[in-house]
């Protein structure tokens, strides 16, 4: 594993109400790395991200740069630099694109910085700049995904959680999106945890990956190791090595 | 009263724990339900011979409210529609019965089916526009109906007796029963209540009931699955109005007096509060709600003579804290935990 | 041990038979006692040589709660009589008050509670026409006196099938007759605009007024009703003002009375003679409107308003203020509902003193044969009289006009029975 | 014609009162999806507090400011103490809690201040502007102006402040709002506080016209419901427009439609609501809610 562990998850269980979905997950992500979480539907990938951002009940420990996150409220975790782009993108539909972006910076002070960050986001996603006054609900799926990532970046996150960014997007758009995520990771040294059905894409940008099945980690390794694993190849990559 | 208590407490109090556990296991939920119903019925039948007429009257009114709440439960609890106007259907049933008794001298048993039918038809007519509305908006439209009914009743004075209302003779007990008036009224109400519960039970187990549940759980999905939404929503509204109308009819028998100001908006709101407090979508919810509506105001006055409303309001809030899903849910939780304790013993 | 529906029925029947066999309920009349001697056979439930138990039903909760002050005045009076006079004829009075929230079914429940559980001697005041109508059949079947009910509907006096129920205050029809009489003298060709509450009270008074002006030159130029649930009567007042009537008859309850008085004052193009009915004639209704805005308003009264300075040195009023402070320390004695309660309690005191037999029958007969009984809190000249053909204890009122900061009584006390003949259905 | 215009003006005056309470209803509904049945009673209670301040000898405007502050705090407190414990419960449970609150506040006010009516100082002068046979009372103008000012302030708050943006975010998508670091609980409390403040304004506007007593707002609440339904429960501007429409319709119908008369005029807003909802179930200004399968 990585020498410098930025996010450390130990023995994490989580779930909804009476139902436990995660059973003692352990993993760590190095600073500035992209970590892909793979696995079949219902394995608990989304729950893992929700556990990290405090939206479900958890047991066990989550440490970000040494500070404990477990059992804090979602807004408190967000204020500690964790930006979660949820499944379904979490767009504030009736608000304008600009208001959506500004909400990303809700926890920050300093007007000048926010304005500068807006420009930075426009750099990544030029299409958003042309739609600033538009109601977010009127954007296309791909644009909404860009908006969601842009909103997350507005908080200058230390940890970015992406849940199925490719869902419902055309392949070309998805490819573009992942390229941008890679760029952001490289330019801003943002640590990223990405949950993705499309294992190819995820492994292309990730340094390391974990396979989750029935709420447990069944396989961990570098992106290349995982790609080379026969089992994974069969189940998630659709070919034999 | 000793008999029923022994039946329910029997397994718990037995000296041989092993036998107790075996017995507890052998009583399946279905059987337990039948036993509970039987005990309840037995107690209900013996009450009027045990209590003073004043208490008998109170329990008669509990059943009247329970029948109305049964209708509301069908609509709110099983079909997921909110009505703030059920007092209006209650009033329509009450007035229909009163007018039949007062103007046409119909024998009173006849007034029940007719009053129920009138409420049903009215519910059907009002259910048609209600089909297009949902949630809050339906609630407000029904609230408006409840408000409008009062001046409407006053306007058509020649039929309704106007704001003076109508005073009627109460059904007299037939001589062969040897019952006093309050006991006779009690058994009439009990019969209607049992009938209403059986009818509601049957309705919910029928195709209609399944369709209603589908509507409640996910309206759009139900429609995709081929449930004829407008049809069932209207039907739910009409059935529910019918129960309220039947309750209103029995109310007229029991009270012997109807006036527009007896059916103000507060009645509708009290009914809705009653069913939510009692427990939505449950079998015992209407009964518990009826008990709440009947007894809690008097208890409030016993606690604070100067401002009973302060206590009544507080009690509603407190019940909702303790039992967010209603008293029926609370009773279920208590029963389950007692059972767990028994099992572990 | 599977129970089929049949089994269920069997269990039920068994239990039913068992209970029916071993326990009959306490008979309804348990605790019911009867008198001996000259009053032999008459009911003495709730009364002993040292005590009387009375029960009253009022709205203490809900929209009509304002009337919940009346029993406090009654209680103060009885507390005073119990403590300082040794009770009524040596009997200490216990007054049990129950809340019906102005809902008839609740009133029935509470009436039964008072009679069957509390075992009261009599129902002393049930408030409101609907609640009283819902309970009077019961009271009369049980032969429990239901006396001095707090509603002015005329049926308490005209009805013959309910001898156990009797009113107290002047009925609304008589009050309407007083206003009609006044107009016939002062404005024989008046065009009257009427605002009335759309319920039994408003209808009774308005219909009575229409009947009383029948055949005279007085006409109703416009009529508007309101519901108790209306926020305001301003729209009604605008419509009435357009009629150009020269007399305005204000048949309202206190809040709406104030609103109508204020609307009349605001409108400077319409200045009719304003007659406000007794229910809304209290100083507490006029004061919020501003005394300068209600000068010259006419009304009629039968009991003394504690806010009225002319009674400042009246012995009964002084006693009232003193004892209210003593026995109802939290209450403001200026509230006319307290004075109303005081007056009706004093009336009961007089009636009880006149009973021949201290029994329910005795009380029923006593309140139906009152002869010119004087009560200190009633206006001078207003007395209680009943008889075989007269079921209305108080039928006299006196007109009054508002001047400065108080009502000024004018004219003679009008005995409506003498003036207009007995009221019939 | 002058008579008609006069009725129109009076209708607008009545409508402004309905609008102010409807505004308070909409504020809470927007954030929580709850219809607060106790809104009118809370407003009535605030008005009593203002009355108490003026009786204690404070000048009216100071009493007003103090009352608004107390109401704001009280609204937040109610959210924290009364509503928070049932936050996760079914919507209907929360609605019934507000019904309980209604009964409680109403009875408490009667207990503390009795049911006798009180006169409340009118902040506006008594006269009227006369123009072409039309007479518009200063108090009518005043009420309309206050409602306009409240609308304006709310607009500024929601559109041009960070807190306002946060509140709108909570209304739009509470889960997502949490994920961007907004303290949703505080925003809800803030919404209740704001609604209580607007309600207090409404009560203080109503009291000089209807006279202060515990049941003062009961009738107004019904019309405010109608106004909010008409305008769309998620649109503050709609609530105001709805309030004015209901006020005018009710007044005109009571005056000009003979058959309706004053006893059935309450049917007019009912008919309007029914008609509007059948054509546009989301209200005139509301957003269509599309439910996905």
Image: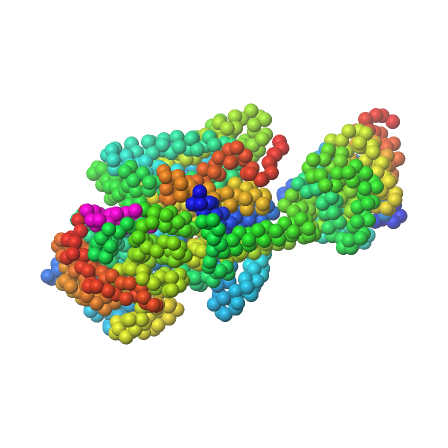
Left or right position of C378 against D103: left
Residue at the spot x=17%, y=49% of the render? C424
Q: Is residue C157 visible?
A: yes
Residue D64 x, y percent position in the rendering: 54, 62
| Camera-nearest residue between B37 and B114 | B114
Q: Is residue A69 visible?
A: no
Left or right position of C138 against C236: left
Left or right position of B24 against B92: right
Task: Give the extent of the magenta segment.
Answer: C195-221
Residue at the spot x=56%, y=24% of the render? B226
Q: Residue furthest front?
A: D132
Asked if residue C218 is among those painted magenta in the image, a careful observer would answer yes
Residue D75 x, y percent position in the rendering: 56, 56
Residue B4 x, y percent position in the rendering: 39, 44
Residue B64 x, y percent position in the rendering: 36, 42
| Camera-nearest residue between D85 and D36 | D36
Asked if residue B200 is among those painted magenta in the image, a careful observer would answer no
| Camera-nearest residue between D254 and B300 | D254
Q: How many labels does the image show?
A: 0
Residue at the spot x=33%, y=49% of the render? C244
Question: What sort of colour scheme is used for the picture?
Answer: rainbow
Residue at the spot x=47%, y=67% of the render? D55
Q: Is C286 above or below relative to A88?
A: below
| Camera-nearest residue between D34 and C315 | C315
């Amino acid at each position: 594993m990585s020498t410098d562990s930025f996010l450390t998850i130990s023995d994490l269980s989580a779930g909804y109400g009476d139902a436990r979905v995660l059973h003692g997950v352990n993993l760590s992500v190095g600073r500035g790395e992209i970590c892909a979480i793979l696995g079949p539907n219902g394995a608990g990938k989304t729950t893992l991200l929700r556990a990290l951002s405090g939206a479900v009940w958890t047991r066990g420990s989550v440490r970000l740069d040494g500070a404990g996150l477990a059992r804090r409220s979602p807004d408190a975790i967000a204020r500690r630099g964790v930006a979660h782009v949820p499944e379904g993108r979490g767009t504030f539909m009736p608000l304008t694109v600009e208001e959506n972006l500004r909400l990303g910076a809700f926890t920050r002070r300093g007007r000048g910085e926010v304005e500068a960050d807006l420009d930075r986001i426009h750099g990544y996603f030029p299409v958003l700049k042309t739609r600033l006054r538009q109601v977010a609900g009127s954007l296309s799926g791909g644009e909404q995904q860009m908006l969601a990532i842009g909103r997350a970046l507005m908080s200058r996150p230390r940890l970015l959680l992406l849940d199925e960014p490719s869902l419902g997007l055309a392949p070309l758009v998805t490819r573009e999106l992942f390229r941008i995520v890679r760029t952001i990771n490289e330019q801003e040294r943002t640590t990223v945890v990405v949950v993705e059905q499309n294992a190819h894409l995820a492994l292309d940008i990730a340094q390391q990956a974990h396979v989750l099945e029935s709420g447990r980690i069944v396989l961990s390794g570098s992106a290349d190791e995982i790609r080379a694993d026969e089992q994974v190849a069969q189940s998630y990559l659709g070919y034999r090595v | 009263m000793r008999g029923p208590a022994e039946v329910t407490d029997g397994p718990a109090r037995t000296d041989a724990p092993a036998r107790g556990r075996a017995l507890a296991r052998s009583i399946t939920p279905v059987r337990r339900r039948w036993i509970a119903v039987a005990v309840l019925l037995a107690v209900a039948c013996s009450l009027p011979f045990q209590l003073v007429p004043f208490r008998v009257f109170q329990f008669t009114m509990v059943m009247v409210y329970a029948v109305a709440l049964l209708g509301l439960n069908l609509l709110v609890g099983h079909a997921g529609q909110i009505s703030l106007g059920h007092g209006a259907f209650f009033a329509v049933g009450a007035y229909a019965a009163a007018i039949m008794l007062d103007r046409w001298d119909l024998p009173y048993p006849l007034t029940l089916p007719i009053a129920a039918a009138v409420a049903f038809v009215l519910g059907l007519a009002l259910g048609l526009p209600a089909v297009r509305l949902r949630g809050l908006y339906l609630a407000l439209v029904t609230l408006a109906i409840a408000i409008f009914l009062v001046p409407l009743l006053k306007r058509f004075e020649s039929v309704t007796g106007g704001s003076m209302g109508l005073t009627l003779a109460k059904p007299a007990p037939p001589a062969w029963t040897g019952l006093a008036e309050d006991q006779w009224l009690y058994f009439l109400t009990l019969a209607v209540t049992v009938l209403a519960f059986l009818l509601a039970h049957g309705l919910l187990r029928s195709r209609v009931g399944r369709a209603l549940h589908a509507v409640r759980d996910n309206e759009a999905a139900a429609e995709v699955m081929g449930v004829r939404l407008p049809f069932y929503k209207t039907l739910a509204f009409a059935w529910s109005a019918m129960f309220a109308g039947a309750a209103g009819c029995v109310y007229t028998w029991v009270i012997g007096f109807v006036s527009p100001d007896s059916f103000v908006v507060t009645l509708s709101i009290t009914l809705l509060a009653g069913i939510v407090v009692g427990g939505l979508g449950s079998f015992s919810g209407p009964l518990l709600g009826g008990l709440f509506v009947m007894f809690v105001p008097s208890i409030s006055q016993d606690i604070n003579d100067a401002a009973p409303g302060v206590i009544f309001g507080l009690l509603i809030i407190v019940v909702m804290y303790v039992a967010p899903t209603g008293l029926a849910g609370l009773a279920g939780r208590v029963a389950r935990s007692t059972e767990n304790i028994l099992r572990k013993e | 041990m599977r129970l089929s529906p049949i089994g269920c029925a069997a269990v039920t029947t068994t239990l039913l038979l068992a209970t029916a066999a071993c326990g009959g309920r306490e008979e309804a009349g348990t605790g019911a006692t009867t008198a001996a001697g000259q009053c032999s056979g008459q009911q003495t439930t709730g009364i002993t040589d040292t005590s009387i138990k009375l029960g009253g039903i009022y709205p203490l909760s809900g929209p009509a709660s304002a009337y919940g002050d009346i029993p406090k005045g009654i209680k103060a009076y009885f507390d005073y009589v119990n403590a300082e006079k040794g009770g009524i004829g040596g009997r200490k009075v216990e007054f049990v008050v129950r809340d019906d929230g102005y809902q008839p079914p609740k009133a029935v429940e509470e009436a039964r509670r008072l009679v069957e559980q509390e075992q009261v001697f009599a129902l002393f005041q049930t408030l409101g026409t609907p609640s009283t109508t819902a309970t009077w059949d019961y009271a009369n079947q049980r032969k429990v006196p239901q006396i001095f009910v707090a509603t002015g509907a005329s049926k308490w006096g005209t009805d013959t099938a309910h001898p156990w129920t009797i009113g107290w205050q002047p009925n609304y029809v008589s009050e309407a007759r007083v206003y009609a009489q006044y107009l016939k003298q002062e404005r024989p060709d008046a065009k009257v605009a009427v605002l009335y509450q759309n319920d039994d009270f408003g209808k009774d008074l308005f219909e009575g007024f229409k009947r009383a002006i029948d055949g005279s030159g007085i006409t109703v130029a416009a009529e508007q009703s309101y519901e108790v649930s209306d926020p305001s009567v301003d729209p009604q007042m605008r419509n009435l003002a357009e009629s150009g009537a020269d007399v305005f008859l204000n048949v309202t309850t206190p809040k709406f009375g104030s609103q109508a008085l204020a609307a009349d004052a605001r409108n400077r193009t319409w200045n009719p003679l304003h007659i406000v009915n007794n229910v809304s004639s209290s100083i507490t209704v006029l004061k919020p409107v501003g005394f300068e805005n209600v000068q010259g308003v006419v009304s009629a009264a039968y009991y003394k308003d504690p806010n009225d300075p002319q009674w400042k040195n009246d012995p009964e009023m002084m006693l009232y203020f003193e004892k209210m402070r003593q026995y109802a320390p939290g209450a403001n004695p200026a509230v006319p509902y307290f004075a109303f309660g005081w007056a009706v309690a004093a009336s009961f005191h007089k009636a009880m003193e006149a009973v021949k037999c201290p029994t329910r029958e005795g009380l029923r007969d006593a309140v139906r044969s009152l002869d010119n009984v004087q009560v200190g809190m009633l206006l001078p000249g207003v007395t209680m009289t009943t008889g075989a053909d007269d079921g209305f204890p108080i039928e006299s009122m006196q007109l009054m006009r508002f001047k400065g900061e108080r009502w000024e009584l004018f004219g003679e006390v009008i005995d409506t029975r003498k003036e207009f003949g007995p009221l019939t259905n | 014609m002058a008579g008609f215009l006069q009725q129109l003006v009076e209708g607008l005056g009545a409508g402004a009162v309905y609008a102010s309470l409807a505004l308070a209803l909409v504020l809470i509904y927007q954030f929580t999806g709850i219809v607060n049945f106790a809104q009118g009673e809370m407003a009535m209670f605030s008005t009593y507090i203002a009355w108490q301040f003026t009786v204690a000898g404070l000048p009216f405007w100071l009493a007003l400011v103090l009352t608004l502050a107390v109401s704001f705090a009280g609204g937040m407190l109610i959210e924290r103490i009364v509503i928070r414990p049932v936050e996760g419960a079914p919507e209907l449970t929360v609605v019934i809690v507000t019904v309980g609150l209604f009964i409680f506040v109403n009875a408490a006010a009667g207990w503390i201040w009795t049911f006798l009516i009180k006169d409340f100082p009118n902040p506006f002068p008594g006269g009227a502007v006369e123009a072409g046979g039309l007479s518009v009372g200063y108090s009518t103008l005043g009420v309309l102006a206050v409602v306009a000012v409240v609308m304006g302030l709310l607009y500024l708050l929601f559109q041009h402040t960070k807190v306002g943006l946060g509140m709108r975010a909570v209304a739009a998508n509470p889960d997502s709002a949490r994920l961007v670091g907004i303290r949703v609980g505080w925003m809800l409390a803030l919404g209740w506080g704001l609604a209580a403040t607007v309600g207090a304004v409404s009560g203080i506007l109503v009291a000089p016209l209807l006279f202060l007593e515990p049941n003062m707002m009961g009738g107004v609440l019904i019309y405010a419901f109608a106004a909010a339904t008409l305008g769309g429960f998620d649109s503050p501007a709609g609530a105001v427009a709805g309030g004015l429409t209901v006020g005018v319709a009710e007044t005109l119908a009571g005056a000009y439609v003979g058959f309706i008369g004053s006893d059935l005029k309450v049917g007019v807003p009912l008919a309007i609501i029914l008609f509007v909802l059948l054509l546009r179930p989301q209200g005139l200004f509301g957003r269509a809610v599309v439910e996905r399968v």
